[in-house]
Structure formats: C-alpha cells, structure tokens
Image (tube, rainbow, N blue to C red):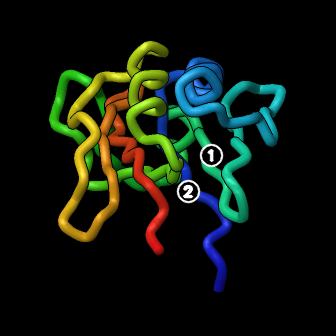
Amino acid sequence: MNLGYVILYVQDVERSVAFYERAFGLARRFVHESKQYAEMETGATALAFVTESVAGSHGFSFRVSRPTEPAPAVEVAFTTPDVPAAFEVAVAAGAQGVSAPATKPWGQTVAYVRDLDGFLVELCTPMG
C-alpha cells in the first residue's frame, strides 16, 4: 500500500487552499468546481481538504477542528531546511504560533503552528 493523501475536514476549502499557499508555499494540485474538495502538491502524498458538510455526508461522525479548542490528536508535518524562516512566514500568513523553533535532542529543529481551522502543523528539518 501507499499513502495517497491526507484529508483535513475544513470549514471553507477555498480559504484553506489560499492559506496553505501563503503560509507554507504549497501549490494547488486540484480544486473541484464545487469548491468542496481540493488537493495540494506536497510530493508523493497529497494534502487534501474537504468541507465538513461533505465529510458529514459519509455516514460517520467526527469532531470538528476549531482554533479556539484543543488541537486534534494529529498533525501535518512539512520539512524545510530553514524552520525559523518557515515559522515566521506561517505566522505572518495568519497561523497561530504554538511552539517556536527549537532543536530536539536528536538534532532536528522543530516548530508548531495551528492553521485557520486549528489543525497542528509541524515545521521541521528533514531527518538524516
């Protein structure tokens, strides 16, 4: 099996796409004309967004993510050689700074922000 994409359930797909372009420099791969589903270029695995209303039509329940509530127990991680610069760009684009860049005992530099829907986004240097 291969991981094809990760999908975040968001309030507004267009808003999320525009934010991820500004905050993390991602490019749009696909935005459906309904504006209820989109994919971003992130390498072999795409990051996708679907509206909460469409996700709710699949017959299962889920907890929505909101920036005013505790973050869900999941994160999206982007690697970059310059975590401090990426952190500054993300915060300037509207991300909520959670944890400033810090070097971990294993040598990796890591920072955290939350996106407009409250999802955690890790910014980190590549391992190895």
Residue 61's x, y, as percent? 35, 50
Mark 2 burial class by Cα count in 10 Å: few <14, some 14-19, many 20+? few
Viewer-proximal residue among 35 and 1: 1
- With 28 as the anchor, is 125 left or right in this view? left
Is residue 83 shown left or right of residue 2?
left
Q: Specify the farthest residue to the bottom.
A: 1
Residue 49 at x, y percent in the picture:
59, 40
Residue occupying image coordinates x 59% and y 39%: 50
Residue ID at (27%, 26%): 97
Mark 1 in CB contact with mark 2 (< 8 angstroms): yes
Residue 97 visible, this orientation: yes
Q: In which quarter of the image is residue 123?
A: top left
Q: Which amino acid does label 1 sit on?
A: Ala
Near-viewer residue (109 or 75): 109
Q: What element carries label 1?
A: strand
- The percent coordinates of residue 16 (x first, y second) are 56, 26
Provide the residue designation for mark 1. Answer: 48
Q: Image height check: is 49 above or below 2? A: above
Picture quadrant where residue 101 is located: top left
List the residue tagged with mark 2: 6
Asked whether, in this view, residue 19 is left or right of residue 120, the answer is: right
The answer to whether residue 116 is seen in the rendering is no
Which quadrant holds the N terminus? Answer: bottom right
